[in-house]
């Protein structure tokens, strides 16, 4: 029996499978049978160039790989998670399901753990998140992530199963905080990229990163997250990586918005849909999320970077901390 299946053979799923298969029994499952059989032959995933798939890693489109697994890592983009769970419900029910995608479902406004709970009430939702580029994980470079599980015992068991010598996992019971940190940092990374791409400079980028982080906390805390989770790997840690590195697709997408250049629509940019979802959540909850709203407007083509930034500068002066007077 395969202990771990990774569902979703994009860059991140492939990287996790490559890292885990050194010490664990792992299979990589993808939905596209011809692509999976090409990958099984070539031992390369075009979405993760320069990485050879180890001979010990089975690469398959056979749904038995999902039913046979004890634990399934869900590495599909956030906007496709619900459909994936519905399509494979009999294979996934009753199992620990580790959500690895970063986003908020635009249709339901649910994060990954609530999406799992709604689709498969018998499954145990976990969230794996934090600063990690797929290429770094696949190359075995040192990485530290957060693994969230409401059940302490299962969380500790899965932490031991999924950690590797180079991939250090910290655990928490704060699912909401972990998943919102990962989802919302992509929105702020788009803002930071747009700022640099528009030529507004690194000081402005630092301001957006910091004020954006305040918005991440404002929304996440209202939705039940713990502040210290947001201060950790899954919030601040991932924000620092994604909002400052051209290794990030969200940041590069922001750069292209700032430069008024086209961006390849086939590239996964989770922050685009999540900005719209977070802005809707903020509106419903009556929260002040100006950076998030600006990104949602940029993504929808309702404003440009210069106008959006000027609007932020024109806002009334206020105290820095929400709690201060
Ligand atoms: N690439 C990275 O460095 C990291 C990515 N992530 C997260 O992992 C998630 C996936 O990202 P990537 O693998 O990078 O994207 P990707 O664009 O490389 O691959 C996405 C994969 O999902 C598959 N897919 C799409 N819809 C599906 C469905 N309904 N059923 C099954 N498979 C489906 C696609 O065929 C594709 O293979 C995203 O939420 C991303 O934020 C998290 C950390 C790092
Ligand atoms: O989540 C990531 C790093 O932790 C990957 O970021 P991008 O999706 O922006 O490439």
Image (tube, helix red, strand yellow):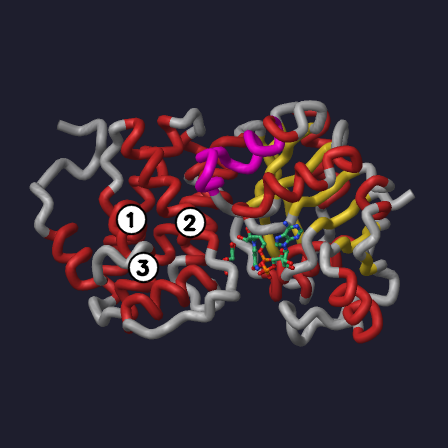
Q: Quadrant of ligand 1?
A: bottom right
Element class at badge 2 = helix
The disc placed on residue 210 is 1
Q: CA distance from mark 1 to mark 3?
A: 10 Å
- Front one among 272 and 254: 272
Q: CA distance from mark 3 to mark 2?
A: 17 Å
Instruction: Let me know if residue 25 appears in the view.
Output: yes
- Front one among 33 and 68: 33
Q: Name the residue rendered at 73%, 44% in the picture.
A: 162
> CB of mark 2 within 8 Å of CB of mark 1?
no
Left or right, residue 170 beside residue 38: left
Q: Is residue 266 above or below residue 179?
A: below
What is the quadrant of the N terminus in the image? Answer: top right
Residue 250: x %, y % from top left: 43, 60
Q: Which range of residues does the magenta coloring cover?
A: 104-117
The disc placed on residue 273 is 2
Left or right, residue 98 beside residue 224: right
The disc placed on residue 192 is 3
Q: Is residue 298 above or below residue 230?
A: below
Element class at badge 3 = helix
Q: Nearer the viewer, mark 3 or mark 2?
A: 2
Whether 156 is among the magenta residues is no
Query: Could you tell which of marks 1 and 3 lies nearer the N-terminus?
Result: 3
Left or right, residue 77 beside residue 25: left
Q: Name the residue rendered at 62%, 50% in the picture.
A: 76
Residue 272: x %, y % from top left: 40, 53
What is the quadrant of the C terminus in the image? Answer: top left
Query: Could you tell which of marks 3 and 2 lies nearer the N-terminus?
Result: 3
Residue 84: x %, y % from top left: 65, 43
Instruction: Let me know if residue 170 appears in the view.
Output: no
Q: Is residue 78 above or below residue 134?
A: above
Element class at badge 1 = helix
């Amino acid at each position: 029996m395969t202990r771990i299946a990774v569902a979703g053979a994009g860059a991140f799923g492939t990287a996790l499978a490559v890292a885990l298969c050194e010490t664990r029994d792992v299979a990589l499952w993808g939905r596209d049978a011809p692509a999976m059989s090409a990958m099984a032959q070539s031992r390369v995933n075009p979405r993760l160039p320069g990485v050879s798939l180890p001979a010990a890693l089975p690469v398959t489109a056979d749904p038995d790989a999902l039913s046979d697994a004890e634990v399934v890592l869900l590495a599909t983009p956030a906007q496709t998670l619900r459909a994936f769970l519905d399509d494979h419900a009999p294979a996934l029910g009753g199992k620990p399901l580790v959500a690895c995608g970063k986003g908020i479902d635009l249709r339901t406004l649910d994060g990954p753990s609530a999406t799992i709970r709604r689709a498969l009430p018998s499954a145990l939702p976990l969230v794996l998140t934090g600063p990690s580029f797929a290429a770094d994980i696949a190359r075995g470079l040192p990485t530290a992530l957060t693994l969230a599980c409401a059940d302490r015992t299962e969380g500790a068991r899965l932490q031991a199963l999924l950690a590797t010598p180079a991939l250090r996992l910290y655990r928490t019971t704060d699912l909401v905080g972990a998943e919102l940190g990962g989802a919302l940092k992509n929105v702020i990374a788009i803002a930071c990229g747009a700022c640099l791409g528009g030529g507004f400079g690194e000081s402005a980028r630092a301001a957006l990163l910091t004020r954006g982080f305040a918005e991440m906390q404002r929304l996440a805390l209202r939705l039940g997250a713990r502040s210290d989770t947001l201060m950790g790997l899954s919030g601040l840690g991932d924000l620092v990586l994604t909002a400052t590195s051209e290794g990030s697709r969200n940041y590069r997408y922001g750069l292209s918005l700032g430069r008024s250049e086209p961006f390849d629509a086939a590239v996964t940019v989770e922050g685009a849909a999540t900005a719209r979802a977070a802005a809707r959540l903020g509106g419903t909850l009556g929260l002040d999320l100006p950076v998030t709203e600006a990104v949602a407007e940029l993504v929808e083509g309702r404003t440009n970077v210069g106008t959006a930034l000027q609007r932020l500068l024109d806002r009334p002066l206020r105290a820095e901390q929400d709690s201060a007077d």
